[in-house]
Image (cartoon, grey):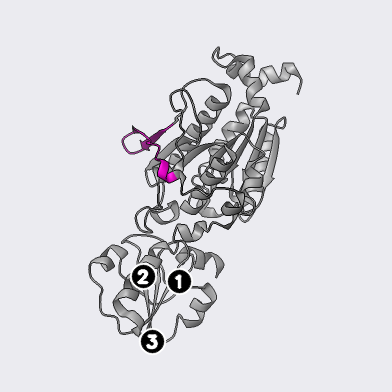
Amino acid sequence: MSKLAENERYQRQISLKELGENGQQKLKNSKVLVVGAGGLGCPTLLYLAGAGIGHIGIVDFDVVSLSNLHRQVLFSVHDIGLSKSLRAGDILGKLNPDIEIEVFNQKLDNSNALEILAGFDIILDGTDNFASRYLINDACVLLNKTLVYGAISRFEGQLAVFNKASTSAKIPANYRDLFPLPPADDEVLNCEEAGVIGVLPGIIGTMMANETIKLITGIGEPLLNRLLTYNSLNNRFFEIELVVMPETTKMIPKNADSFKTFNYNWFCNINSNFELKHKDFERIMNEQDIQIVDVREQGEEPLINDFKHIHIPLSHLKEQIPDMDAQTIVLFCQSGKRSASAAEILSKHYGQSRKIFSLKDGIAGWQKNK
Protein backbone atom coordinates (compact mmCIF):
# COMPACT_ATOMS: atom_id res chain seq x y z
CA MET A 1 0.00 0.00 0.00
CA SER A 2 1.28 3.44 -0.88
CA LYS A 3 1.80 5.98 1.88
CA LEU A 4 -1.06 8.05 0.45
CA ALA A 5 -3.48 5.12 0.48
CA GLU A 6 -2.33 4.11 3.96
CA ASN A 7 -2.97 7.59 5.29
CA GLU A 8 -6.40 7.59 3.69
CA ARG A 9 -7.35 4.20 5.18
CA TYR A 10 -6.31 5.15 8.71
CA GLN A 11 -6.96 8.89 8.50
CA ARG A 12 -9.59 8.97 11.25
CA GLN A 13 -7.23 7.08 13.55
CA ILE A 14 -4.09 9.04 12.69
CA SER A 15 -6.02 12.26 13.32
CA LEU A 16 -6.12 11.40 17.01
CA LYS A 17 -3.27 13.44 18.48
CA GLU A 18 -2.72 10.78 21.16
CA LEU A 19 -2.05 8.18 18.43
CA GLY A 20 -0.89 9.95 15.26
CA GLU A 21 1.37 8.53 12.56
CA ASN A 22 3.80 7.20 15.16
CA GLY A 23 1.09 5.16 16.83
CA GLN A 24 -0.17 3.88 13.49
CA GLN A 25 3.33 2.71 12.64
CA LYS A 26 3.49 0.83 15.95
CA LEU A 27 0.27 -0.95 15.05
CA LYS A 28 1.69 -1.83 11.65
CA ASN A 29 4.83 -3.26 13.24
CA SER A 30 2.99 -5.34 15.84
CA LYS A 31 2.22 -9.06 15.92
CA VAL A 32 -0.97 -10.14 17.72
CA LEU A 33 -2.29 -13.67 18.21
CA VAL A 34 -6.00 -14.34 18.82
CA VAL A 35 -6.76 -17.77 20.27
CA GLY A 36 -10.33 -18.67 19.41
CA ALA A 37 -12.25 -17.38 16.39
CA GLY A 38 -15.61 -17.62 18.14
CA GLY A 39 -17.87 -15.13 19.90
CA LEU A 40 -15.02 -13.07 21.35
CA GLY A 41 -12.54 -13.69 18.57
CA CYS A 42 -14.78 -12.52 15.71
CA PRO A 43 -15.28 -8.88 16.80
CA THR A 44 -11.73 -8.72 18.15
CA LEU A 45 -10.28 -9.84 14.84
CA LEU A 46 -12.46 -7.47 12.82
CA TYR A 47 -11.33 -4.41 14.74
CA LEU A 48 -7.68 -5.42 14.97
CA ALA A 49 -7.61 -5.92 11.19
CA GLY A 50 -9.43 -2.63 10.67
CA ALA A 51 -6.99 -0.83 12.97
CA GLY A 52 -4.03 -1.96 10.88
CA ILE A 53 -2.31 -4.52 13.11
CA GLY A 54 0.47 -5.62 10.78
CA HIS A 55 0.53 -9.32 11.59
CA ILE A 56 -2.48 -11.18 13.03
CA GLY A 57 -2.44 -14.84 14.03
CA ILE A 58 -5.62 -16.91 14.41
CA VAL A 59 -5.77 -20.22 16.30
CA ASP A 60 -8.93 -22.33 16.10
CA PHE A 61 -9.65 -25.94 15.14
CA ASP A 62 -13.47 -25.79 15.21
CA VAL A 63 -15.92 -25.48 12.31
CA VAL A 64 -18.81 -23.04 11.88
CA SER A 65 -22.24 -24.26 13.02
CA LEU A 66 -25.68 -22.70 12.80
CA SER A 67 -25.77 -22.07 16.56
CA ASN A 68 -22.67 -19.86 16.23
CA LEU A 69 -24.20 -17.28 13.95
CA HIS A 70 -26.14 -15.18 16.47
CA ARG A 71 -22.85 -13.97 17.95
CA GLN A 72 -19.94 -14.96 15.68
CA VAL A 73 -20.33 -12.08 13.27
CA LEU A 74 -17.55 -12.97 10.85
CA PHE A 75 -19.52 -15.90 9.48
CA SER A 76 -22.69 -16.56 7.48
CA VAL A 77 -24.87 -19.57 6.70
CA HIS A 78 -22.64 -20.22 3.69
CA ASP A 79 -19.75 -20.95 6.07
CA ILE A 80 -21.47 -23.72 8.06
CA GLY A 81 -19.22 -26.76 8.24
CA LEU A 82 -16.11 -24.80 7.22
CA SER A 83 -13.03 -24.13 9.33
CA LYS A 84 -13.44 -21.03 11.52
CA SER A 85 -9.78 -20.07 11.38
CA LEU A 86 -9.46 -20.48 7.61
CA ARG A 87 -12.69 -18.58 6.92
CA ALA A 88 -11.74 -15.84 9.37
CA GLY A 89 -8.37 -15.47 7.67
CA ASP A 90 -9.98 -15.22 4.25
CA ILE A 91 -12.56 -12.64 5.37
CA LEU A 92 -10.02 -10.47 7.20
CA GLY A 93 -7.72 -10.60 4.18
CA LYS A 94 -10.49 -9.06 2.09
CA LEU A 95 -11.22 -6.43 4.74
CA ASN A 96 -7.59 -5.36 4.85
CA PRO A 97 -5.37 -6.98 2.21
CA ASP A 98 -2.32 -5.01 3.33
CA ILE A 99 -1.87 -6.85 6.63
CA GLU A 100 -0.47 -10.34 7.12
CA ILE A 101 -2.83 -13.05 8.38
CA GLU A 102 -1.34 -16.26 9.78
CA VAL A 103 -3.78 -19.12 10.35
CA PHE A 104 -3.27 -22.05 12.72
CA ASN A 105 -6.08 -24.47 11.94
CA GLN A 106 -5.30 -26.68 14.92
CA LYS A 107 -6.02 -27.16 18.60
CA LEU A 108 -3.69 -25.24 20.89
CA ASP A 109 -2.16 -27.68 23.38
CA ASN A 110 0.99 -28.42 25.35
CA SER A 111 2.86 -29.66 22.32
CA ASN A 112 2.50 -26.52 20.17
CA ALA A 113 1.54 -23.58 22.41
CA LEU A 114 5.03 -22.34 23.25
CA GLU A 115 6.13 -22.50 19.62
CA ILE A 116 3.02 -20.70 18.30
CA LEU A 117 2.87 -17.99 20.97
CA ALA A 118 6.60 -17.23 20.71
CA GLY A 119 6.12 -15.50 17.35
CA PHE A 120 3.75 -12.82 18.65
CA ASP A 121 3.95 -9.74 20.88
CA ILE A 122 0.50 -9.88 22.50
CA ILE A 123 -1.79 -12.86 23.01
CA LEU A 124 -5.59 -12.57 23.19
CA ASP A 125 -7.51 -15.36 24.89
CA GLY A 126 -10.98 -15.78 23.40
CA THR A 127 -11.45 -19.40 24.46
CA ASP A 128 -14.41 -20.74 26.43
CA ASN A 129 -12.97 -23.34 28.81
CA PHE A 130 -10.71 -23.32 31.84
CA ALA A 131 -8.15 -25.84 30.59
CA SER A 132 -7.33 -23.61 27.60
CA ARG A 133 -7.22 -20.47 29.77
CA TYR A 134 -4.73 -21.97 32.22
CA LEU A 135 -2.64 -23.36 29.37
CA ILE A 136 -2.51 -20.00 27.55
CA ASN A 137 -1.77 -18.12 30.76
CA ASP A 138 1.09 -20.43 31.75
CA ALA A 139 2.60 -20.29 28.27
CA CYS A 140 2.45 -16.48 28.37
CA VAL A 141 4.18 -16.39 31.76
CA LEU A 142 6.93 -18.73 30.55
CA LEU A 143 7.42 -16.67 27.38
CA ASN A 144 6.90 -13.29 29.11
CA LYS A 145 4.05 -12.40 26.76
CA THR A 146 1.28 -9.91 27.55
CA LEU A 147 -2.12 -11.62 27.73
CA VAL A 148 -5.45 -9.90 27.06
CA TYR A 149 -8.19 -12.00 28.66
CA GLY A 150 -11.92 -11.98 27.97
CA ALA A 151 -14.74 -14.23 29.13
CA ILE A 152 -18.52 -14.23 28.71
CA SER A 153 -21.53 -16.10 30.08
CA ARG A 154 -25.25 -15.32 29.92
CA PHE A 155 -25.40 -11.51 30.36
CA GLU A 156 -22.00 -10.83 31.95
CA GLY A 157 -18.48 -10.43 30.63
CA GLN A 158 -14.99 -10.08 32.08
CA LEU A 159 -11.89 -8.33 30.80
CA ALA A 160 -8.30 -8.04 32.08
CA VAL A 161 -4.69 -7.63 30.95
CA PHE A 162 -2.31 -10.17 32.48
CA ASN A 163 1.44 -10.56 32.69
CA LYS A 164 2.26 -6.93 31.91
CA ALA A 165 4.39 -4.92 34.31
CA SER A 166 4.22 -1.13 34.60
CA THR A 167 5.13 1.66 37.00
CA SER A 168 1.82 1.14 38.79
CA ALA A 169 1.87 -2.66 38.49
CA LYS A 170 5.52 -3.59 38.96
CA ILE A 171 4.66 -7.23 39.66
CA PRO A 172 2.16 -8.28 36.98
CA ALA A 173 -0.87 -10.39 37.83
CA ASN A 174 -1.67 -13.48 35.80
CA TYR A 175 -4.81 -15.57 35.35
CA ARG A 176 -3.95 -17.78 38.32
CA ASP A 177 -4.17 -14.73 40.59
CA LEU A 178 -7.82 -14.50 39.55
CA PHE A 179 -8.50 -18.26 39.69
CA PRO A 180 -5.74 -20.03 41.70
CA LEU A 181 -7.68 -23.26 41.23
CA PRO A 182 -10.32 -24.16 38.63
CA PRO A 183 -13.92 -23.75 39.76
CA ALA A 184 -15.88 -26.92 40.39
CA ASP A 185 -17.64 -28.35 37.35
CA ASP A 186 -21.04 -26.93 38.26
CA GLU A 187 -19.89 -23.54 39.58
CA VAL A 188 -19.16 -21.74 36.31
CA LEU A 189 -21.00 -22.83 33.15
CA ASN A 190 -19.71 -22.14 29.65
CA CYS A 191 -21.79 -20.51 26.92
CA GLU A 192 -22.95 -23.83 25.54
CA GLU A 193 -24.41 -24.77 28.92
CA ALA A 194 -25.56 -21.40 30.28
CA GLY A 195 -26.32 -19.53 27.04
CA VAL A 196 -25.20 -16.03 26.09
CA ILE A 197 -26.90 -12.92 24.72
CA GLY A 198 -25.53 -12.38 21.21
CA VAL A 199 -24.34 -8.79 21.64
CA LEU A 200 -22.23 -9.52 24.75
CA PRO A 201 -19.20 -11.08 22.99
CA GLY A 202 -19.28 -8.12 20.60
CA ILE A 203 -19.01 -5.71 23.54
CA ILE A 204 -16.25 -7.62 25.35
CA GLY A 205 -14.46 -8.55 22.12
CA THR A 206 -14.18 -4.94 20.96
CA MET A 207 -12.96 -3.98 24.43
CA MET A 208 -10.25 -6.64 24.09
CA ALA A 209 -9.24 -5.06 20.79
CA ASN A 210 -9.23 -1.65 22.44
CA GLU A 211 -6.93 -2.87 25.25
CA THR A 212 -4.59 -4.33 22.61
CA ILE A 213 -4.40 -1.05 20.69
CA LYS A 214 -3.68 0.83 23.93
CA LEU A 215 -0.92 -1.62 24.86
CA ILE A 216 0.76 -1.33 21.46
CA THR A 217 0.56 2.45 21.10
CA GLY A 218 1.06 3.39 24.75
CA ILE A 219 -2.09 5.49 24.98
CA GLY A 220 -4.57 5.41 27.86
CA GLU A 221 -4.51 3.12 30.88
CA PRO A 222 -4.68 -0.62 30.15
CA LEU A 223 -6.41 -2.92 32.66
CA LEU A 224 -3.21 -3.97 34.41
CA ASN A 225 -3.79 -5.90 37.65
CA ARG A 226 -7.47 -5.05 37.33
CA LEU A 227 -10.52 -7.12 36.39
CA LEU A 228 -13.42 -5.37 34.68
CA THR A 229 -16.86 -6.99 34.85
CA TYR A 230 -19.74 -5.82 32.67
CA ASN A 231 -23.44 -6.59 33.13
CA SER A 232 -25.41 -6.13 29.91
CA LEU A 233 -28.79 -6.19 31.68
CA ASN A 234 -28.17 -2.95 33.58
CA ASN A 235 -25.15 -1.57 31.66
CA ARG A 236 -23.08 -1.47 34.82
CA PHE A 237 -19.34 -1.92 35.09
CA PHE A 238 -17.59 -3.23 38.19
CA GLU A 239 -13.83 -3.17 38.64
CA ILE A 240 -11.65 -4.94 41.19
CA GLU A 241 -7.93 -4.84 41.89
CA LEU A 242 -6.17 -8.16 41.39
CA VAL A 243 -3.84 -9.15 44.22
CA VAL A 244 -0.63 -10.82 43.07
CA MET A 245 -0.14 -13.96 45.13
CA PRO A 246 3.38 -15.50 45.10
CA GLU A 247 1.97 -18.94 45.85
CA THR A 248 0.01 -18.99 42.59
CA THR A 249 3.19 -18.51 40.57
CA LYS A 250 4.49 -21.74 42.08
CA MET A 251 1.61 -23.57 40.37
CA ILE A 252 2.89 -22.59 36.92
CA PRO A 253 5.21 -25.11 35.22
CA LYS A 254 8.81 -24.00 35.69
CA ASN A 255 10.08 -24.62 32.17
CA ALA A 256 9.11 -25.84 28.72
CA ASP A 257 9.58 -29.51 29.59
CA SER A 258 7.30 -29.38 32.63
CA PHE A 259 4.77 -27.32 30.67
CA LYS A 260 4.58 -29.95 27.94
CA THR A 261 3.89 -32.69 30.47
CA PHE A 262 1.36 -30.76 32.60
CA ASN A 263 -2.13 -32.28 32.24
CA TYR A 264 -4.46 -29.27 32.00
CA ASN A 265 -7.52 -31.43 31.34
CA TRP A 266 -6.91 -33.39 34.52
CA PHE A 267 -6.17 -30.17 36.44
CA CYS A 268 -9.55 -28.76 35.37
CA ASN A 269 -11.40 -32.05 35.94
CA ILE A 270 -12.50 -32.25 32.32
CA ASN A 271 -11.96 -35.96 31.88
CA SER A 272 -14.17 -38.15 34.04
CA ASN A 273 -13.54 -41.73 35.09
CA PHE A 274 -17.22 -42.29 34.30
CA GLU A 275 -17.08 -41.10 30.67
CA LEU A 276 -19.25 -43.02 28.22
CA LYS A 277 -18.34 -42.70 24.54
CA HIS A 278 -21.03 -41.92 21.97
CA LYS A 279 -20.87 -45.29 20.22
CA ASP A 280 -21.16 -47.14 23.54
CA PHE A 281 -24.10 -44.95 24.55
CA GLU A 282 -25.94 -45.78 21.33
CA ARG A 283 -25.23 -49.46 21.88
CA ILE A 284 -26.81 -49.56 25.36
CA MET A 285 -29.36 -46.71 25.27
CA ASN A 286 -32.32 -48.99 24.51
CA GLU A 287 -31.44 -51.82 26.88
CA GLN A 288 -34.05 -52.83 29.44
CA ASP A 289 -32.14 -52.38 32.70
CA ILE A 290 -30.91 -48.82 32.12
CA GLN A 291 -31.92 -45.42 33.46
CA ILE A 292 -30.90 -42.32 31.48
CA VAL A 293 -30.98 -39.07 33.45
CA ASP A 294 -30.89 -35.47 32.21
CA VAL A 295 -29.14 -33.42 34.94
CA ARG A 296 -29.60 -30.05 33.24
CA GLU A 297 -31.74 -27.38 34.87
CA GLN A 298 -35.38 -26.88 33.95
CA GLY A 299 -35.92 -25.19 30.58
CA GLU A 300 -32.49 -25.92 29.09
CA GLU A 301 -32.52 -26.75 25.39
CA PRO A 302 -32.38 -28.70 23.22
CA LEU A 303 -35.29 -30.85 24.29
CA ILE A 304 -34.48 -34.54 23.88
CA ASN A 305 -36.91 -36.96 22.23
CA ASP A 306 -34.41 -39.46 20.85
CA PHE A 307 -34.57 -41.83 23.83
CA LYS A 308 -36.44 -42.36 27.10
CA HIS A 309 -35.03 -40.52 30.08
CA ILE A 310 -35.94 -38.78 33.30
CA HIS A 311 -35.03 -35.29 34.44
CA ILE A 312 -33.23 -34.67 37.75
CA PRO A 313 -31.29 -31.36 37.82
CA LEU A 314 -27.84 -31.59 39.38
CA SER A 315 -28.89 -29.02 41.98
CA HIS A 316 -31.68 -31.37 43.14
CA LEU A 317 -29.45 -34.42 42.98
CA LYS A 318 -27.08 -32.82 45.46
CA GLU A 319 -29.90 -32.37 47.95
CA GLN A 320 -31.60 -35.76 47.65
CA ILE A 321 -30.76 -38.82 45.60
CA PRO A 322 -33.90 -40.66 44.42
CA ASP A 323 -34.13 -44.43 44.37
CA MET A 324 -33.18 -45.87 40.98
CA ASP A 325 -33.58 -49.60 40.43
CA ALA A 326 -31.73 -49.83 37.12
CA GLN A 327 -28.33 -51.47 37.23
CA THR A 328 -26.93 -49.05 34.65
CA ILE A 329 -27.34 -45.30 35.04
CA VAL A 330 -26.29 -42.89 32.28
CA LEU A 331 -26.26 -39.18 33.05
CA PHE A 332 -26.08 -36.35 30.54
CA CYS A 333 -25.98 -32.55 30.50
CA GLN A 334 -25.09 -30.05 27.80
CA SER A 335 -21.32 -30.57 27.62
CA GLY A 336 -20.50 -33.45 30.01
CA LYS A 337 -19.19 -31.41 32.94
CA ARG A 338 -22.26 -31.43 35.19
CA SER A 339 -23.05 -35.05 34.39
CA ALA A 340 -19.51 -35.97 35.47
CA SER A 341 -20.21 -34.27 38.81
CA ALA A 342 -23.51 -36.13 39.07
CA ALA A 343 -21.73 -39.42 38.35
CA GLU A 344 -19.33 -38.73 41.23
CA ILE A 345 -22.29 -38.14 43.56
CA LEU A 346 -24.15 -41.29 42.54
CA SER A 347 -20.99 -43.38 42.66
CA LYS A 348 -20.43 -42.42 46.29
CA HIS A 349 -24.08 -43.19 47.06
CA TYR A 350 -24.40 -46.55 45.28
CA GLY A 351 -20.83 -47.79 45.54
CA GLN A 352 -20.21 -50.86 43.37
CA SER A 353 -23.89 -51.84 43.15
CA ARG A 354 -24.54 -49.79 39.98
CA LYS A 355 -22.78 -49.07 36.68
CA ILE A 356 -22.72 -45.28 36.45
CA PHE A 357 -21.71 -43.29 33.36
CA SER A 358 -21.50 -39.69 32.18
CA LEU A 359 -22.12 -39.09 28.46
CA LYS A 360 -18.90 -37.84 26.89
CA ASP A 361 -19.14 -34.22 25.62
CA GLY A 362 -22.78 -34.08 26.74
CA ILE A 363 -25.91 -34.15 24.65
CA ALA A 364 -24.53 -31.40 22.38
CA GLY A 365 -21.53 -33.56 21.49
CA TRP A 366 -23.68 -36.63 20.94
CA GLN A 367 -26.12 -34.79 18.65
CA LYS A 368 -23.26 -33.28 16.71
CA ASN A 369 -21.67 -36.67 16.05
CA LYS A 370 -24.64 -39.03 15.77
Residue on which disc 1 sits:
273
Q: Give amino acid for label 2.
A: Glu
Depth check: give the residue in front, 24 or 8: 24
Q: Is residue 112 visible?
A: yes
First in sequence, mark 2 or 3: give its number.
3
Q: Looking at the image, do the residues carrying marks 1 and 2 touch, with CB atoms under 8 Å apart?
A: no
Frontmost of labels 2 and 3 is 2
Q: Give amino acid for label 3.
A: Asp
**Image location of residue 252, percent across then percent down:** 50, 48
Q: Which mark is residue 344?
A: 2
Whole-number angstrom distance, CA of label 1 to CA of label 2? 9 Å
Question: Residue 15, relative to residue 276: is it above or below?
Answer: above
Q: Looking at the image, do the residues carrying marks 2 and 3 touch, with CB atoms under 8 Å apart?
A: no
Task: Give the magenta-colored segment's residue range.
Answer: 225-248
Question: Residue 13, relative to residue 259: is it above or below?
Answer: above
Residue on which disc 3 sits:
289
**Dot 1, how many residues are within 10 Å of its Cα: few (below 14), some (14-19), or many (20+)?**
few
| Label 1 residue SS | loop
First in sequence, mark 1 or 2: give its number.
1
**Image location of residue 118, percent across then percent down:** 65, 41
| Label 3 residue SS | loop
**Image location of residue 320, percent across then percent down:** 23, 70
**Image location of residue 16, percent across then percent down:** 55, 14
Depth check: give the residue in front, 262 or 302: 262
Query: From this viewpoint, which residue is outermost toward the right?
Result: 2
Q: For the point 73% across and 16% down, which residue is it? A: 4
Whether residue 279 is in magenta: the answer is no
